[in-house]
Image: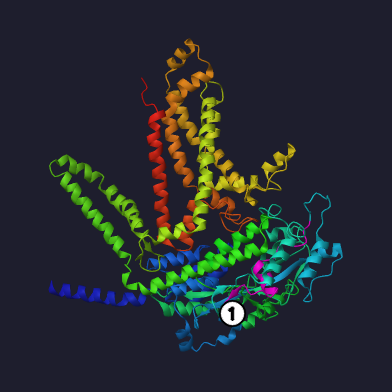
């Protein structure tokens, strides 16, 4: 027996000693590539790497939300080992110390960075350290349709073109055969404002002082005016370009030329039927375009940094990049491939070298900073959107407003950074929240034991609901109470929460966009709630009859309530298309000029209200229908005997008896209107009028959408929690007020 035990121990020891060597190192790779073709190519690189490194296994995770997932995983302590990243996302990740500098690996392996084009390496550096290994870069060029140029007799663009030449050519290329103000062919699109400003020689940001220049420079005003001069003439308005893209218009011979980026080359080459080419971007006082560089980074929390570095190095190597094939979605950062006539420089287009040469004059108007993303989405874009649609605002006013708000945003981030550095000792690790929820569970268990101590039957009941109680504490009550605590903290997921008292509330009080979102939500609520209640009651009364087809119509009217909100929103987005949509087509038959709907700050919110009312009739209608069928018929007979008309019977019999149903629908409609999100998010994002949801010019920025952006885009979780509790108090207050007022008009006595 003793020998058997010894043999068993030796066997187990041998097995345990061999398992680490046999076990593969698994790395998570987070990529932005989501198209099938791109994923297949990335998998080729992974397969080749795994063949050379049999002890390493790469798990590919492809998603457009890679940066957000990387941040949240890093906050949870389980980040992806490697992630694809562009230079604009580096500052926040570096600031929170969740990226690993690559300099030590480069030094130890003797890597020669001279194999890359120099500026691609520079854009991956911050504070003198290299945080991402370059893969490729993107610049701008002027795409032009040779067929349309030949038809109008306009010379092809070349490096001598200025912005005045560009505008004159666009004027000649714009074709309005019907003279109705809707050209069949547009000469150009409006130009990215940053490109124009830099080309005109404007310096809108001073890196020495880290401030936006006030008052705005004259050159910046000239650039904005130039852009506005194109709108509605040579370039389409938001209404004319709604629900289409520059590449679609270009491929369909409706656009003669536009400023495009390298990543658009594969799609244009695939869809373009007419001959086309590219030329250098026009010049003002100087030639300028935006430079973006992409590469792979390694998480500071990776458990296998050396293996991750081997994968990063292989991905950007000559062998790895050649596995991607000749796709031209970006210019390779490797000098050999970027300048190879057999690789990137092979046509089409004929003058593709323009994209490589552009790196010499490419750059950034605004530096990469932790505040840059919030600045562009909440200040820069909405202000310029408002300028395009509101003739009362001048370029001087718009740029001055951008500079003023931008400097306030910089000050806010600087203050938060100073507080973070000085208050590290007051920070609380987030694991206290877990301990807090466990304490709640223990207290709950003790409370249950105390309540059930005298009766065994209580124990049996609590035992049956025990799992539900545990889930309720862990996933509902605990997080709710944790959010209450976090609403008084400065918390961004990437660092421990710091108690700041009422600072989040005060910040919201002084935040114009907070009040804008609250005002938009109230506007939505005031019109949506009564319209939904009245129209659903009207439908319920119509369907409360015993005629053939009633059940079919009930199903039809309830169908929108069963359909996914995203699908309905996409449908109505097409209905609201100013040029091709069903709504304006119908209005045109009536001789009415339809508005721009989602492209207009004035009409965007009414458009969403109309859609929400249409989609929200089904639920209240069924509740009303149940209430109507529960009203005793003898009450109507008694009213008829007393000589009551139909209106009098409705007013004095139907409404009082239906008041509990009306009250319920009222409360639910108010709660739903304050929580509107999906409709606005889907209908207003990535339109010709607004790249960001909530546009144009923040005209549809509702409360929950702003809360979402605050928490999950800008990672201001403390502020987002404060907003959530403010919303809770608003809804609670309105509910209590309605409950108190209901005592005057809601009748529960059915006798």
Say whether residue 192 is magenta: yes
Front residue (pair 659, 154): 659
Front residue (pair 588, 544): 588
Residue farthest toward the right in the current orientation of the protein: 153
Residue 161 in the figure: left or right of residue 360: right
Measured as percent of width and height from the top left, residue 256 is found at 77, 62
Q: Secondary structure at mark 1?
A: helix
Image: 114 above or below 636? below
Color scheme of the displayed model: rainbow
Image quarter of residue 336: bottom right
Q: Is residue 32 visible?
A: no
Q: Is residue 192 visible?
A: yes
Q: Which residues are magenta?
A: 185-206
Number of numbered labels in the structure image: 1
Measured as percent of width and height from the top left, residue 563 is found at 52, 42
Taking the spot 50% from the left edge, 53% from the top edge, the residue there is: 515
Front residue (pair 390, 716): 390
Image: 381 above or below 351? above
Taking the spot 69% from the left edge, 48% from the top edge, the residue there is: 578
Q: Which residue is mark 1?
A: 120
Residue 695 in the figure: left or right of residue 632: right
- Callout 1: 10 Å neighbours few (<14), some, many (20+)? many
Front residue (pair 133, 689): 689
Measured as percent of width and height from the top left, residue 246 is found at 69, 60
């Amino acid at each position: 027996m003793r020998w058997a035990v010894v043999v068993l121990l030796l066997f187990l020891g041998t097995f345990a000693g061999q398992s680490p060597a046999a076990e593969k190192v698994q790395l998570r790779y987070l990529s932005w590539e989501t198209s099938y073709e791109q994923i297949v190519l990335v998998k080729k690189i992974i397969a080749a790497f795994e063949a050379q490194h049999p002890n390493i296994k790469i798990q590919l995770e492809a998603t457009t939300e890679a940066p957000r997932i990387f941040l949240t995983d890093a906050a949870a302590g389980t980040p992806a080992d490697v992630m694809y990243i562009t230079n604009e996302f580096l500052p926040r990740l570096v600031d929170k110390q969740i990226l690993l500098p690559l300099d030590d690996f480069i030094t130890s392996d003797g890597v020669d960075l001279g194999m890359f084009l120099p500026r691609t390496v520079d854009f991956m550096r911050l504070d003198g350290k290299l945080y991402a290994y370059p893969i490729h870069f993107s610049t701008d060029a002027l795409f032009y349709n040779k067929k349309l140029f030949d038809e109008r007799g306009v010379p092809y663009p070349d490096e001598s073109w200025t912005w005045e030449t560009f505008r004159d050519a666009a004027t000649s290329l714009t074709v309005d055969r019907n003279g109705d103000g809707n050209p069949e062919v547009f000469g150009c699109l409006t130009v990215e404002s940053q490109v124009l400003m830099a080309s005109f020689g404007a310096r809108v940001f001073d890196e020495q002082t880290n401030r936006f220049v006030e008052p705005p420079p004259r050159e910046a005003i000239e650039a904005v005016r130039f852009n506005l001069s194109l709108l509605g003439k040579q370039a389409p308005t938001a209404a004319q370009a709604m629900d289409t893209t520059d590449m679609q218009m270009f491929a369909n011979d409706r656009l003669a030329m536009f400023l495009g980026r390298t990543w658009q080359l594969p799609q244009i080459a695939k869809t373009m039927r007419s001959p086309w080419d590219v030329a250098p971007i026009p010049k003002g006082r100087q030639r300028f375009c935006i430079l973006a560089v992409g590469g792979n980074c390694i998480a500071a929390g990776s458990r296998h940094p050396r293996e991750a570095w081997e994968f990063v190095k292989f991905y950007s190597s000559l062998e790895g990049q050649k596995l991607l094939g000749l796709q031209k979605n970006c210019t390779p950062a490797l000098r050999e491939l970027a300048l190879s006539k057999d690789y990137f420089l092979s046509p089409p287009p004929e003058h593709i070298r323009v994209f490589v040469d552009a790196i010499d004059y490419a750059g950034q108007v605004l530096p990469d900073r932790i505040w840059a993303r919030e600045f562009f989405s909440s200040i820069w874009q909405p202000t310029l959107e408002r300028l395009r649609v509101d003739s009362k605002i001048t370029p001087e006013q718009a740029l001055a407003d951008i500079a003023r708000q931008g400097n306030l945003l910089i000050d806010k981030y600087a203050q938060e950074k100073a507080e973070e550095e000085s208050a590290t000792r007051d920070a609380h690790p987030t694991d206290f929240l877990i301990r807090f929820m466990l304490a709640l569970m223990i207290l709950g268990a003790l409370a249950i034991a105390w309540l059930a101590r005298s009766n065994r039957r209580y124990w049996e009941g609590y035992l049956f609901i025990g799992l539900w109680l545990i889930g309720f504490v862990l996933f509902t009550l605990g997080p709710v109470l944790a959010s209450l605590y976090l609403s008084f903290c400065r918390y961004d997921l990437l660092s421990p929460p710091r108690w700041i008292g009422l600072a989040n509330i005060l910040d919201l009080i002084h935040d114009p966009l907070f009040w804008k979102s609250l005002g938009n939500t109230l506007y939505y609520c005031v019109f949506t709630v009564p319209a939904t209640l009245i129209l659903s009651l009207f439908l319920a009364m119509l369907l409360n009859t015993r005629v053939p087809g009633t059940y079919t119509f009930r199903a039809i009217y309830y169908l929108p309530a069963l359909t996914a909100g995203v699908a309905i929103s996409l449908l109505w987005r097409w209905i609201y298309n100013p040029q091709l949509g069903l709504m304006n087509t119908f209005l045109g038959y009536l001789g009415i000029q339809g508005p721009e709907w989602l492209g207009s700050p004035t009409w965007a919110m009414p458009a969403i209200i109309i859609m929400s009312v249409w989609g929200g009739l089904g639920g209240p209608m069924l509740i009303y229908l149940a209430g109507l069928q529960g009203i005793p018929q003898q009450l109507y007979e008694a009213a008829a005997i007393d000589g009551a008309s139909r209106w009098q019977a409705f007013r004095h019999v139907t409404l009082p008896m239906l008041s509990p149903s009306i009250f319920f629908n009222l409360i639910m409609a108010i709660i739903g209107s304050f929580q509107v999100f999906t409709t606005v998010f889907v209908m207003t994002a990535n339109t010709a009028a607004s790249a960001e949801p909530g546009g144009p010019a923040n005209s549809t920025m509702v409360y929950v959408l702003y809360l979402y952006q605050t928490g999950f885009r800008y990672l201001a979780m403390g502020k987002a929690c404060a907003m959530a509790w403010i919303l809770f108090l608003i809804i609670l207050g309105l509910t209590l007020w309605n409950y108190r007022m209901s005592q005057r008009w809601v009748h529960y006595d059915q006798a």
